[in-house]
Image: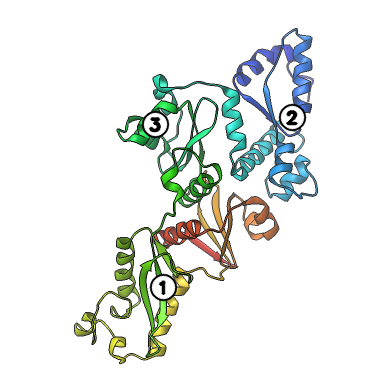
Amino acid sequence: MLRNAPKFYEVAKRIVEITEDCIFVAHNSSFDYRILKTEFNRLGFPFKRKTLCTVELSKQLIPDMQSYSLGKLTRALGIPVSDRHRADGDAKATVKLFKLLLDKDIKKKIIKQSVKTEQRSKIASNLKSIIEELPQETGVYYIHNEQGEIIYIGKSNNIKKRITQHFTGSNSKSKKIRTLVASVSYERTGSELVALLKESEEIKKNKPILNRALRRTIFTHALYQFIDKHGYINLQIDKANRKEEPITTFTNRQSAKSFMFNIADTYELCQKLIGLYKTNSSCFKYEVKECNGACIQEESVEAYNKKIQALIQTYSYENKNMLIIDRGRFIDERSVVVIENGRFKGLGFFDLNHQINNPEVLLSLITPMTNNKDNQHIIQSYVRRNNKRLKIIKF
């Protein structure tokens, strides 16, 4: 293999070029980095780069693994490896592992440290160069100040367009961003659902100074149920501050009302019993022969409640075990959001069927997240709007 390989001095210049202003990432980086430094010392060249070790990062972000060798770790995580123990195969496996570690780093310690290390002061006079490096893709973006600290976190279906709006906007937030920004980092997510969940979680974890408005609850209204004196299940929109668990939640009253009109048609529900038509007698739909008469007890309690239960089963994931499959960052990849016993467990990415069909591998792939009301709302709202396109696996 080495007979026709170039000598180190023949590739040294290229190594310097491709690693300039970069952070050297490797599995057990001290070993690889030491070899490079030794070879450069022989040439009399002082080679110095910042390093990141995926062994150390894996121990921090994926604890309790049996082994942290590249082969056993990638096998446990279901990461495909070709040409094992060859430079190309090992490097590609390390890239996939590093991407997984970046996903799991909710507190953004890796990004913040690397931005600070790079010390590229891209301030207001050079905003255009920041924009040019950004993708027109779905994901989460992080605006940093000169110290590498995250001052704002956002999500967008077009990161470049959204950052351009920040840099050209006339509102007070845009002006503050332009004053403080030194650089922008980002994560592609492919899925808008993943971007929304990461944005919500990371704002709460990192508390950026310009995200104060988004730290508050992101929904205001919710759908509740109760049984009337005749035994019919009634639905009611109310402010989302009641103690009982809602069926689903809404960003505002208008979106809740629009949803109610849709389900009235889809499930053939009585407008009176879902709070859309106030009357002491029959509802409007009964008069035009579009209601089966639950409002005046003509439709049986069993038949009507069965329709309501079907609706609840569709829009509430209480006590459910399910995987929500959506777009990934690449053509051959998919994202997954995991719900276990009605609780949001986390999210991740997979590109092989055995990764998602093996519970142990799946749980090691996902980034654990908080099961709070904001995240529940994001998931329910997104599934409501994209139900026909999403793939949902129940387990």
- Disc 1 + disc 2, Cβ < 8 Å: no
| Looking at the image, residue 372 lies above or below residue 301 | above
Q: Position of residue 311 (x, y in %)?
A: 42, 74
Please name whichever residue, 290 or 56, is drawn nearer the observer in this view of the structure.
56
> Closer to the N terminus: mark 3 or mark 1?
3
Q: Nearer the viewer, residue 356 or 257?
A: 257
What residue is disc 1 on? 224
Does the image show residue 7?
Answer: no
Q: In the rendered image of this protein, does residue 3 appear above or below residue 244?
A: above
**In the rendering, at what x and y percent does residue 195 appear?**
48, 47
The mark found on residue 176 in the picture is 3
Q: Amino acid at mark 2?
A: Ser
> Residue drawn at (72%, 45%), measured in percent from left and top?
74
Whole-angstrom CA distance, mark 1 to mark 2, is 55 Å
- Residue depicted at x 39% and y 28%: 178
The residue most toward the top is: 44
Distance CA(mark 3)–CA(mark 2): 39 Å
Left or right of 274 on screen, residue 92 = right
Q: Secondary structure at mark 3?
A: helix
**Type of amino acid at the residue the image marks with label 3:** Lys
Q: Earlier in the sequence, mark 3 or mark 2?
A: 2
Q: Is residue 327 left or right of residue 102?
A: left
Give the label, 1 or 2, closer to the camera: 1
Q: Which residue is mark 2?
A: 29
67 up-or-down from 231: above or below: above
**Which dot, 3 or 1, sits closer to the camera?**
3
Q: Are marks 3 and 2 in contact (CB under 8 Å)?
A: no
Quote the CA–CA distance across marks 3 and 1: 41 Å
